[in-house]
Image: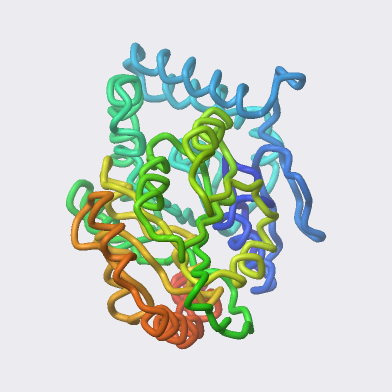
């Protein structure tokens, strides 16, 4: 039995990819420990270590923002790598668990956030380290001046110093994998964020009422207001529900923008385990996002695979890695250009039979684009490492 430590800066009971990693490692019969913020719910049999907080009365998001900003400013003016790494450990709350973790002996450390990578190497002893590069971190918020000036240079430095030392690197899409190889000369295996297989019927749509759905994070970078603009150009057949979490200001602004648009509702989010059953009652999964940043251009998000698993047709802009999956499987519709008008035109011309056909093709794709198939990437990686332990 291997001893595995998973390190992440988000709640692993709510974040899909870290949650899946915990469950996967348990399924392999590993002894699993997690270093993270205090989780909303704990998995039986998992040992938890907390990143801790010196301000327990403040909301977690405020604590994280304070840590990120103060840590980034200090790092900018430090020249010593060890001091920079120490600042990260303190600012992210990692240092609180260091003594406890050094008393342990792990076989594998799986890291879910770039800022945690130096810390992972400081406590690993002889353990192998795998980094789950969920995005291209040096360009994570590249349209933000503060990020570009204070955080991006050090993130690039972490990648340059630590990625070659990792025993394995996985990422979410071909575009991001290519960028890591181009910039840092490291090969990343593509492990897509697919959900577990759901046995669900393919709902037959009504030609008079086409139900569209979007779910996810209300982040300013995603410009969800453009999805509202697209919907405002559609005819009365179309209905759109948006299940949103995240930035309350963004959600409030979207509600104001949509208040006079018939057939559009902005709803509260549903729990992670209820997403696919909930959205399976719709016809089209909708995600139009323009390539404002490198990571948005090459995103391959959870929601794409959740749409397919829910047996929905998919409607997206021409994001290259998403479009490749949709077009290869014939399970949806891609606009010709990244414009509101082009996306609206693509949807407006759809017939009920075309949408139903795409839904049926999602039903076929769902059996391939699921975690039960995708985990073979992890199996091959970990089996290879265990042979060398």
248 vs 299, left or right, is: right
Q: Horizontal placement of 29 versus 324: left or right?
A: right
Give residue 78's position: percent from left, percent from top. Answer: 36, 14
Residue 127 can be seen, yes or no? no
Q: Is residue 127 above or below residue 52?
A: below
Residue at the spot 34% in from the left edge and 52% down from the top edge? 233
Residue drawn at (39%, 42%), measured in percent from left and top? 222
User: Residue at position x 64%, y 74% from top?
Assistant: 28
Residue closest to the eye, 176 or 187 = 176
> Where residue 370 appears, x then y in whole percent?
51, 76
Q: How is the image coloured?
A: rainbow
Marker count (numbered): 0
Residue occupying the point 69% across, 72% down: 29
**Residue at the outermost right position:** 44
Front-most of residues 383 and 172: 172
Residue 173, image x, y percentages: 33, 61
Residue 17 appearing in the image: yes
- Left or right position of 318 against 46: left
Report the front residue among 237 and 152. 237
Image quarter (top left, top right, bottom left or bottom right) of the N terminus? bottom right
Compared to 165, does 64 lie above or below? above
Image position of 47 with respect to 54: above or below:
below
Task: Residue 124 in the image: state x and y as whole percent.
Answer: 54, 46
Please indicate whether residue 381 sits to the left or right of residue 181 in the image. right
Image quadrant in which you'd find residue 85: top left
Question: On screen, 332 above or below 126?
Answer: below
Quarter of the rendering containing residue 304: bottom left
Taking depth in this image into account, of 16 and 126 the one nearest to the observer is 16
């Amino acid at each position: 039995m291997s001893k595995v430590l998973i390190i992440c800066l988000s709640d692993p009971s709510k974040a899909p990819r870290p949650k899946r990693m915990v469950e996967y490692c348990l399924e392999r019969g590993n002894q699993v420990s997690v270093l993270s913020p205090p989780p909303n719910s704990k998995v039986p049999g998992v040992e938890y270590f907390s990143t801790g907080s010196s301000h327990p009365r403040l909301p977690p998001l405020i604590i994280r923002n304070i840590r990120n900003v103060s840590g980034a400013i200090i790092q900018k003016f430090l020249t010593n790598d060890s001091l920079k790494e120490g600042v990260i450990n303190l600012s992210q709350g990692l240092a609180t668990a260091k003594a406890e973790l050094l008393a342990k002996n792990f076989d594998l450390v799986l890291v879910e956030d770039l800022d945690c990578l130096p810390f992972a190497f400081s406590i690993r002893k002889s353990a192998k380290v795998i980094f789950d590069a969920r995005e291209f971190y040096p360009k994570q918020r590249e349209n933000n001046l503060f990020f570009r000036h204070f955080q991006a240079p050090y993130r690039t430095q972490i990648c340059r110093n630590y990625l070659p030392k990792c025993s394995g690197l996985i990422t979410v899409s071909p575009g991001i994998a290519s960028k890591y190889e181009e910039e840092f000369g490291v090969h990343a295996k593509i492990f897509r964020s697919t959900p577990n297989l759901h046995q669900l019927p393919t709902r037959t749509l009504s030609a008079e009422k086409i139900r569209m759905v979007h779910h996810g994070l209300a982040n300013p970078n995603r410009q969800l207001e453009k999805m509202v603009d697209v919907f405002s150009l559609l005819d009365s057949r179309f209905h759109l529900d948006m299940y949103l979490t995240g930035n309350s200001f963004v959600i409030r602004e979207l509600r104001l923008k949509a208040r006079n648009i018939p057939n559009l509702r902005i709803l509260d989010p549903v729990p992670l385990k209820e997403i696919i059953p909930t959205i399976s009652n719709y016809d089209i999964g909708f995600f139009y996002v323009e390539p404002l940043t490198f990571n948005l251009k090459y995103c391959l998000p959870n929601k794409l695979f959740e749409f397919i698993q829910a047996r929905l047709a998919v409607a997206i802009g021409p994001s290259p890695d998403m479009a490749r999956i949709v077009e290869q499987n014939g399970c949806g519709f891609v606009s010709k250009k990244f414009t509101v008008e082009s996306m609206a035109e693509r949807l407006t011309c759809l017939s009920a039979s075309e949408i139903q056909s795409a839904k049926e093709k999602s039903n076929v794709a769902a059996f391939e684009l699921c975690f039960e198939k995708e985990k073979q990437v992890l199996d091959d990686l970990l089996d290879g490492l265990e042979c060398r332990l």
